[in-house]
Image (tube, rainbow, N blue to C red):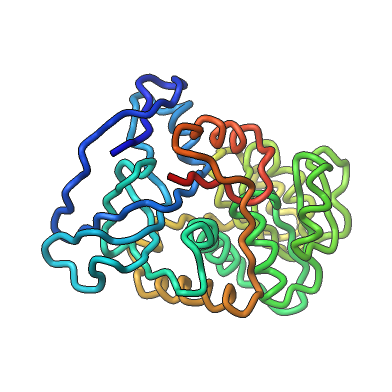
Amino acid sequence: MRRVRYESTGGPLFLEEAPVPEPGPGELLVRCEAIGVTLPVVRKVTEAAEPVPLGGEIAGEVVAVGAGVGRFGAGERVTGLCFGHGYADYALLREAMASPIPDTATAVDAVALVRSGLVALGALEAARPERGEAALVTAAASGVGHLAVQLAQARGAGRVVGAVSDPAKADFVRSLGADDVVTYGEESWGDPVDYLLDAVGGDIFRPALAALTPGGRLVAYSSGGGTIRAYDLLVGAKSVIGFQMARIARGEPELYERWRRELWRLFEVGAVKPVVHGEFALEDASQAHAAIESRVNRGKAVLHP
């Protein structure tokens, strides 16, 4: 089989031949039909001290199962988060991380919706939204952000604002249902909002906190770092809530599964529509990474073996 690898930090991605892996206990062997590209994986290539397997979201057909697997069998279509080599023709997926793909969805729909949608829905849940409240979503054109905009609308937000790095993305974000769009460099982000879902971090924190109404909540789920001053929270009694999807997946599997079912329900009724920026061949994985790293993507970048 083919898989994508790199040999040094920041080094080029390349295809290599590798044996098809054997599923171990509790694992599924999946023939990959679609592979989601995420910013955390892109950052591993450019920042990790040692080369790591390129994992991430995969979707496809189960071709074999390991000992102890009871929920899935050969021929079923699944999606989930792969922690090993996921940029490949075949990948191993833990049964606990797998979920079925409905007949109404494609593999590309699945990788564009499930993992990014779980992060977006989890961040939204962490904000404890109430119907009619105003919301702001940073990185609103990203794989997670474009779903967060739609989910906020579906949850009854009175106004949804999308924040983006480039004004050229404004029309796309409005097409998702956003009422207003701002860019990070603007002096003011408009009327204050009740809660803010932030996927950027870093220098964005200060204007993001300023955009909150008194008592507002900022949910931080970025891997981009950054510092928040206590004084900026004290003024206006604002709060910051950290959200990490991995903690939910490991520690609250029932909640994780409930969110997955909710995402598919919203997809099937048309309330949430994942958008794909582009489908790239395995040998073009570096192009997909470049689209994410430069933040030109509108929606999800997907590898298509």
Q: Which of 167 and 35 is in front in this view?
A: 35
Indicate the position of residue 69 as horizontal and vertical percent values.
Answer: 18, 67
Q: Quadrant of the N terminus?
A: top left
**Residue drawn at (61%, 45%), measured in percent from left and top?**
278
Does 251 sit above or below residue 163?
below
Q: Residue at x 51, y 44 (%)?
A: 38
Please tell me which residue is depicted at 56% across the width and 66% down the height of the picture: 121
Q: In which quarter of the image is residue 137?
A: bottom right
Work out whether residue 239 can be spotted.
no
For the image, the number of numbered tags is 0
Q: Which residue is drawn at 60% across and 66% down?
A: 124
Residue 141 spot, x, y in % from top left: 70, 50
When the figure is inspected, residue 240 is found, relative to residue 151, above or below; the finding is above
- Give the side of residue 232 with respect to residue 79, left or right: right
Question: Is residue 243 rendered to the left or right of residue 233?
Answer: left
What is the quadrant of the C terminus in the image? top left
Which quadrant holds residue 191? bottom right
Image quadrant in which you'd find residue 117: bottom right
- Residue 77 appears in the rendering: yes
Give the residue at the far left of this rendering: 67
List x then y, in percent, for residue 302.
53, 47
Residue nearest the viewer, comparing 207 with 10: 10
